[in-house]
Image (tube, grey):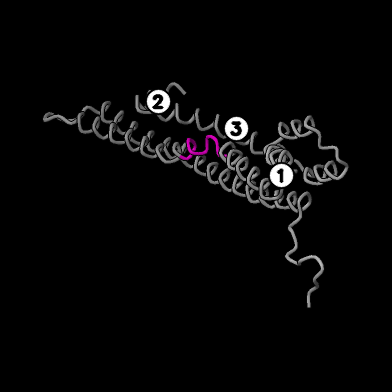
Amino acid sequence: MLSLIQAAGWPVWFLIIASFIAVALIIERAISLRRSRVMPSGLIERVLDLHRQSSSTPEMVQKLENSSPLGKVFAAGLRHSLSGRESMKEAMEETGRAVSHDLERYLATLGTIASITPLLGLFGTVVGMIEIFGAATPTGSNPQALAHGISVALYNTALGLIVAIPALIAYRGFRNRVDGFLIDMEQQSVRLLDGISPRQSNTRPGTGAT
């Protein structure tokens, strides 16, 4: 490892720092964006059963809110269940926006790393090219300096791509996963609304459809 750093020159330190940050973010997001953690299986059915049994106490709602991001959205709706469908919907939408922000945490940083690491590799390549040209003198070239400049250019180019490609794949994968979670949350929120506060019929009392 030390020999690689020496061969790649000082520009490689930017890529090493970026790689450590990328790995940490990928691990953190992989743990945080598990479906079982974001959207526990069967949660909507349990919440509806508790509501039908009139068991949605403040303590239960608080526990639901702390259980998962989806539970946080459901808890917001339950707190406004007595205020009508529109109030429930607005509360769940507002909480959903906050949940969306939490799910997207660090993704912008990961995307930035995927974008800038090839540029950092290019920067190292330019530094290596400068060293190559600096090795040329009117009396000839210094083979050792020339070899070092070439190694700096090639190592930084390769390391920039090695960091950028996994970071970009992870960013796109997490981005798609979050989008899928948000769509599923919206659908389950509609189910909760329909289960607790069904849509009102437009038919007036005492009249019938003809």
In the image, residue 56 sits, relative to residue 210, either above or below, namely above
Residue tagged 2: 13
The quadrant of the image that shows the C terminus is bottom right
Element class at badge 1:
helix
Element class at badge 3:
helix
Q: Nearer the viewer, mark 1 or mark 2?
A: 1
Marked residue nearer the N-terminal end (1 or 2):
2
Magenta region includes residue 118: no
Magenta region includes residue 108: yes
Tag 3: amino acid: Ile
Residue tagged 3: 27
In the image, residue 203 sits, relative to residue 59, either above or below, namely below
- Looking at this view, is 30 or 8 the one in front? 30
Tag 1: amino acid: Ser
- Looking at this view, is 187 or 124 the one in front? 187
Q: Residue at x 36, y 38 (%)?
A: 119
Tag 2: amino acid: Trp
Q: In terms of image quadrants, where is residue 100?
A: top right
Marked residue nearer the N-terminal end (1 or 3):
3
Q: Give the magenta part as a residue range.
A: 104-111
Q: Which numbered disc covers residue 33?
A: none
Is 69 on the left-hand or right-hand side of 57? Answer: left
> What's the CA distance linking mark 1 and mark 3?
41 Å
Residue 53 in view of the camera: yes
> What's the CA distance linking mark 1 and mark 2?
57 Å
Is 64 on the left-hand or right-hand side of 30? Answer: right
Q: Which numbered disc covers residue 83?
A: 1
Residue 35 in view of the camera: no
The crowding category of the residue bearing disc 1, from other C-alpha atoms within 10 Å (few below 14, some 14 to 19, many at least 20), is few
Is 30 on the left-hand or right-hand side of 155? Answer: right
